[in-house]
Amino acid sequence: MASDNLIDGRAIADQIHEETRRQIEALSNQGTPPGLVFVRVGEDPASRVYVAMKEKTCARLGIQSTTHVLPEDTPEKNLLKLINELNASPTVHGILIQAPLPSQINEATIFDAVSPNKDVDGFHPINVGKLLIGDPTGFTPCTPAGVHELLIRSGVETSGAEVVVLGRGNIVGKPMTAILCQKTEHANATVTLCHSRTTNIVEHCRRADILIAAMGVAEFVKADMVKPGAVIIDVGASPAQRVAVDDILAGRAGGPWEVLGRFVERRLPTRTLPIDITDEAAVKRVAIEGVLESKIENIRGWDREQPVTLQNMFNQIHGSTQVLARGDAAYDDREIVVTNESTHALHSRFDWSVTPE
């Protein structure tokens, strides 16, 4: 797909964040600063990172956030006691229980215990029911709400459109269907919900003006299943996609990572974590909350405007043109700790692919 046909999710997210920041500032000036509480049970690595990223976003937007971290062996009754206390607190306006929870805790019981007025995940049965009947006073699950905002802010017309949602999960598929079929602005679509038992699923997809893939199956949607001009939203990464990325990083797919792998004595297991990438004109940042902070800045040439570059370079990973830079990096995943300050760096654009056998 040409770049001018892509929905710019990052730009839309920045826009929403700025609008949210102004709303929070207004509430704080009125004496009611929003308070959000995160509850994490155990030390699941991905959960630690997800919560840390949410804390960082809260700080940036002006939301007062607090995190309760409970031991892995916390009994369900102890977690329920904490939730009841948070439900009763006048300074807590939202409660987010970070999944997954340990095996001794029933997630459905916990999600039902959160007050529907503070259930920012939108998982409580009351909020699920409000979504279904079109009551806007409830909370909506964030992923389908985010997809809806992408469509709205990209100018995609939904009224009268044929929408096909692939996947009937409670977190994305079902609420997505409920959102788009409502008799309201930016909805009024004819929605078909397809799943593993749907017959003629290819024909359903070919009819879609808007196709939303939330099945968790890699490369399920093929080019011949999409009609010209259709809008496609792909929700999330499937286990198969994660395996494919792991194969690349481990060198099993060949290419430059295979060469680098020859110099690695012991490779640690791949972890799936959110990565925050900022690509500005002269400054590049890569961050994994709680694990990595990296920033490099171009070295400018004699005109103090354009960066210094190396041309016609041979490198297994970098492209033939490399930009000279300097920067800092700090990495700590509890097994490997690396810190570099004011060191040299290179960056470039590259294109690498492999044809599966």
Image (cartoon, rainbow, N blue to C red):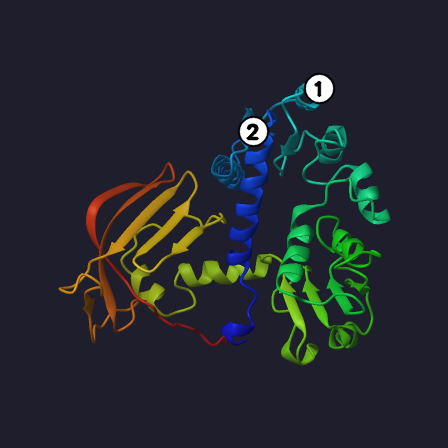
Query: Which image quadrant is residue 81 in?
Result: top right
Which structural element holds mark 2? helix
Q: Which mark is residue 88?
A: 1
Q: Is residue 132 above or below residue 234?
A: above
Q: Is residue 155 above or below residue 135?
A: below
- Give the crowd class for mark 2: few <14, some 14-19, many >=20 residues within 10 Å: few
Instruction: Left or right? Give the position of 243 relative to 158.
Output: left
Q: Residue at x 54, y 35 (%)?
A: 25
Query: Whole-percent x and y of residue 41?
Result: 58, 29
Q: Which mark is residue 29?
A: 2
Q: Nearer the viewer, mark 1 or mark 2?
A: 2
- Give the crowd class for mark 1: few <14, some 14-19, many >=20 residues within 10 Å: few
Q: Residue at x 58, y 57 (%)?
A: 239
Query: Whole-percent x and y of residue 308?
Result: 19, 65
Q: Considering depth in this image, is 306 or 179 the residue closer to the camera?
A: 306
What kind of residue is marked 1? Ala
Query: Which image quadrant is residue 214 in?
Result: bottom right
Q: Is residue 98 above or below residue 268?
A: above
Q: Quadrant of the N terminus?
A: bottom right
Residue 39 visible at all: no
Q: Is residue 270 above or below residue 116?
A: below
Q: Residue at x 74, y 52 (%)?
A: 169
Are the residues at dot 1 and dot 2 in contact (C-beta closer than 8 Å)?
Answer: no
Which structural element holds mark 1? helix
